[in-house]
Amino acid sequence: VDVLINDASKKPGPGAYKLKGGVDLISGGAFSTASPLTDVDRLAMEAKLKPGPGEYGPLLVDAKGRTMLGRGRTWSKAKPLSDVDVLINDASKKPGPGAYKLKGGVDLISGGAFSTASPLTDVDRLAMEAKLKPGPGEYGPLLVDAKGRTMLGRGRTWSKAKPLSDVDVLIND
């Protein structure tokens, strides 16, 4: 502890420095006499900076279409477009029906026509499909030549197959 006291006595303490200018400002403290603004006072001060009723001038446009800022110099002659006028103006800048010419110069735009097609009913469709399938009596008999070959496709070619008879099938099972 003695070492610490000895070390601290060699260092400067409070008030050991002289301030520049020679003025000694160390003289104890003083309480502030300022009164800060309340929230209401602050809002009132901000409101004074904003324009109030009757402080706005109408937005006026001169003959050249420039706006005149100020109070009541001249009446505006502006005629703003309605929403319908804006839509009509936009639509007039876009191509409409018949605006394009087809390549080759063929004009395919003509009146429409009603279809005269009569689609098949379910019964008609089933009848048409049935005509494509063989019916009773449309199968040819299974022909076998002397060598035991079957003839497929109504006499076109002889098959090399050798079918087993019913007896052969029973024996092999």
Image (spheres, rainbow, N blue to C red):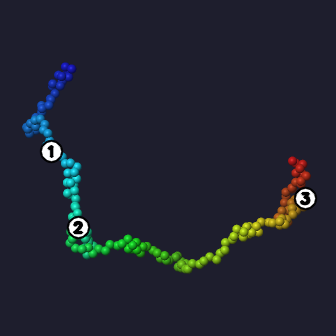
Residue pictured at 69% horizontal, 71% vertical: 120
Residue pictured at 22% horizontal, 49% vertical: 39
**Quadrant assignment, res 118:** bottom right
Image coordinates for residue 80, horizontal then vertical, percent? 32, 72
Q: Which mark is residue 34?
A: 1
Q: Nearer the viewer, residue 143 or 61?
A: 61
Residue pictured at 18% horizontal, 46% vertical: 36
Q: Is residue 58 above or below residue 20?
A: below
Which mark is nearer the camera, 1 or 3? 1
Dot 2: element? loop
Q: Locate residue 75 relative to residue 130 in the image: left or right.
A: left
What residue is disc 2 on? 57
Q: Is residue 91 above or below residue 148?
A: below
Image coordinates for residue 60, horizontal then vertical, percent? 25, 71
Q: Nearer the viewer, residue 100 or 70?
A: 70
Residue pictured at 54% horizontal, 78% vertical: 109
Q: Amino acid at mark 2?
A: Gly
- Whether residue 136 is visible to the viewer of this picture, yes or no, is yes
Q: Is residue 40 above or below residue 7?
A: below
Q: Amino acid at mark 3?
A: Lys
Mark 1 neighbour class, 10 Å CA radius: few under 14, some 14 to 19, many 20 or more: few
Separation (CA) of disc 1 from disc 2 = 40 Å
Q: Locate residue 120 relative to residue 22 in the image: left or right.
A: right
Dot 1: element? loop
Q: Amino acid at mark 1?
A: Ala
Image coordinates for residue 137, horizontal then vertical, percent? 84, 66
